[in-house]
Image: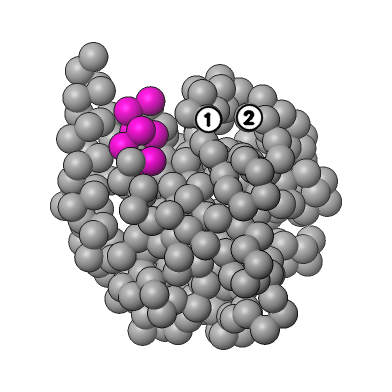
Amino acid sequence: MISNLLKHTDSGNFFILAGPCVIEGEEMAMSIAEHIKNVSDKLKIPFVFKGSYRKANRSKSSSFTGIGDEKALKVLAKVRAEFDVPVVTDIHEVEEAAMAAEYVDVLQIPAFLCRQTDLLVAAAKTGKCVNIKKGQFLSPESMKFAAQKVVDAGNNQVMLTDRGTFFGYQDLIVDFRSIPTMQQLGFPAILDVTHSLQQPNQVSGVSGGNPQMIETMARAAVAVGVDGLFLETHPDPANAKSDGSNMLRLDLFEPLMQKLVRIREVVNQL
């Protein structure tokens, strides 16, 4: 799986993990996947479709969590079959690893759970690629221990994703030194552009965001040589059922990717 993604090195391009925060329905997921697939094919960007089948980490118990586990996982499987792309989803508990692995290609470990040994081992034992998000409370150097748990369980298919570090109670900051630091650990490094712009712990119980900085963050990551970008997108973020405050509007996806590909072309010439 990772080797296929890293074929981008032949052309010097980055890969993308992109899609909605959560699967809200089949029609929505298929529409977003089709749009991203068309853009990624045109620009020769390796593409993994992202969608959470369930949102387990919400500030309020009344927040939307999903359309049902099996139903959402089947939507992910349909995206994979229809568009011939790999798919990634989050898992939160040990028993979810084997279940989700039947439908997806990459199991993602949420940042808050990146030190959960049993979860990492369960994900590793499925044989799927494991994308571990760096905890907002961890240094990039310390991610070697999370990755090593997967490797020690017999799985070398590991990717590491930075999604920012807590900066006070209600903001995150990205230290772009984390990208080469995690690459030096021997694993592909990804920047989660949109979650890095999240503003958590709002008194309303709904996280805020700073989506106008998406292009800035993505450009910086590509400039420093990131292997991949994680980016959530939705046709109508204001009415998205999760994380709408920091998602990219879908119609802005192609112009952003065009700029990023040009930046990478320049960087490759340096």
Q: Do tag 1 and tag 2 residues touch (Cβ < 8 Å)? A: yes
As helix, strand or loop, the secondary structure at mark 1 comes to: loop
Question: Which callout, 1 or 2, points to the residue nearer the camera?
Answer: 1
Residue 219 shown in magenta: yes
- Give the vertical position of 71 relative to 154 (above or below): below
Residue of label 2: 140
User: For this view, does 19 lie left or right of residue 254?
Assistant: right
Q: How many marks?
A: 2
Q: Residue at x 61, y 23 (%)?
A: 185
Does the magenta run of residues contain 43? Answer: no
Residue bounds of the magenta highlight: 217-224
Task: Report the Cα–Cα distance between label 1 and label 2.
Answer: 9 Å
Left or right, 158 with reference to 27: right
**In the shown orientation, is residue 73 left or right of residue 145?**
left
Q: Is residue 213 visible?
A: yes
- The residue sitting at 51% across, 47% down in the picture is 196
Compared to residue 29, the image places residue 88 above or below, namely above
- In terms of image quadrants, where is residue 153? top right
Badge 2 marks a residue whose secondary structure is: loop
Q: Is residue 159 visible?
A: no
Amino acid under disc 2: Pro
Q: Quadrant of residue 224?
A: top left
| Rendered image: mark on residue 175 | 1
